Image (tube, grey):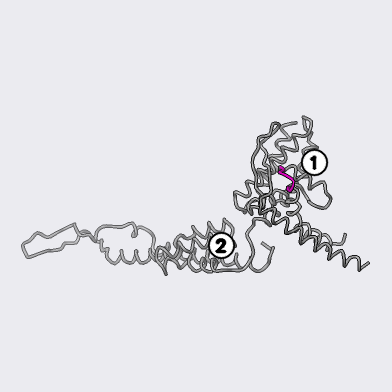
Amino acid sequence: MVPGEGMMLAQLRKGALEYCVLALLRDGERYGFELARTLGEVDGMVTSEGTLYPLLTRLRRDRLVASRWEESLTGPPRRYYHLTSRGQAALDDFIREWRRFRTAVDHFMEEAG
Amino acid sequence: MALTNEKRIATYLRGLRKALRGLPRARGQEIVGAIQSHIESELEGLPQPVSETQILEILDRVGDPDEIAAKAREEFGVSTGRVGVAEIGAVILLPLGGVLLPFIGWIIGVVLLWVSSLWTTREKLLGTFVVPFGLALPLYLTVFAVGVSSTTTCVGGPVEVIRGSPGARSDIGTMPECISSGATTFSWPIVPILLAVGSIAMTIYLVRKLYARTRAPSAL
């Protein structure tokens, strides 16, 4: 891989990752570990599972997600994250922009051959 | 061995805490807690006892503490940006506020310092306590010391003063000039000079940090 490509991918990932997290919460609440696992399973999304947590903390601070604690039968209490209305709105905006962007880039990629 | 595993995890978390230093404390704690919870969740799903190899694999997957801290810094670190009213105000009022606007001036400077997002908590603490009241403190000490020494002529014993008409009792040993105040016991003029230098040096330090942050976007 060309060095420049690595950085480009990192930048793209950085921008999209938080929306991927929001999208995962679209269908219901999930706890941190679940999110980390799901993201990790998709190639190219996270470099390490731990880097998800600073992001989650920031999403909470920005009130795009909210959390609640639940006792777990088998282990320590878990923090369950869910989308706030603000988060839902941000996600909707992103989806719209992303589709437009994706279409545009695909258009030129096809032209290029 | 369970002990080694626990130790490994504890060492990892300690390294993580260290890497997160400099970030707002509550955020750092939240992240460490979340990752600790993550590791415990990983262990939960595995058949006990967990081998050392599995622990290492888990910690590997969680990631390098420095990488996590770098991500955290991206999200919560000191922002880089443009110098604004808060920063200019703080830099002026911290040293000079107490002088320009007694009592209020320096306090406003401190408020602006803490409101700004261009300095770390550590820098803000230094800016607040080195030197409190800025240049007003050494200035006050200077004026006070000069004032005291000009009215304290407490050398050579009580001053005899004759009051009233001849024949009246003279007051001896009740003259206020002989009261020695604490100000005369410090080694003037070293202390005010040190304080003034400290205050100016701290202001320069804060300005340099600002300069660094408004130049290079990610070169903290």
| Position of residue B217 measured from the top left corner of the image (x, y, whole percent) | 68, 65
Disc 1 marks a residue whose amino acid type is: Glu
Magenta segment, which residues?
A: A25-30
Mark 2 belongs to chain: B
Q: Is residue B12 magenta?
A: no
Amino acid carrying mark 2 in the image: Ser
Q: Residue at x 14, y 59 (%)?
A: B171
Residue B133 seen in this snapshot: yes
Residue A30: quarter of image: top right
The answer to whether B49 appears left or right of B161 in the picture is right
Residue B161 is drawn in which quadrant?
bottom left
Image quadrant in which the N terminus of chain A is located: bottom right
- Picture coordinates of residue A26, whole percent (x, y): 73, 48
Identify the residue at the far top of this view. B48
**Which quadrant of the rendered structure holds the C terminus of chain A?**
bottom right
* Drawn side of residue A94 relative to residue B188, left or right: right
Residue named by callout 2: B116
**CA neighbours of label 1 inside 10 A, class few (<14), some (14 to 19), many (20+):** few
Q: Hey, which quadrant is residue B10 in on the image? A: top right
Q: Nearer the viewer, residue B185 or B20?
A: B20
Q: Earlier in the sequence, mark 1 or mark 2?
A: 1
Vertically, is B147 above or below B43? below
Res B193 seen here:
no
Q: Residue at x 75, y 31 (%)?
A: B1
Residue at the disc numbered 1: B57
Specify the principal SS of the magenta part.
loop
What is the residue that sits farthest to the right in this orientation?
Answer: A113
Judge by depth and name the residue closer to the eye, A65 or A42. Answer: A65
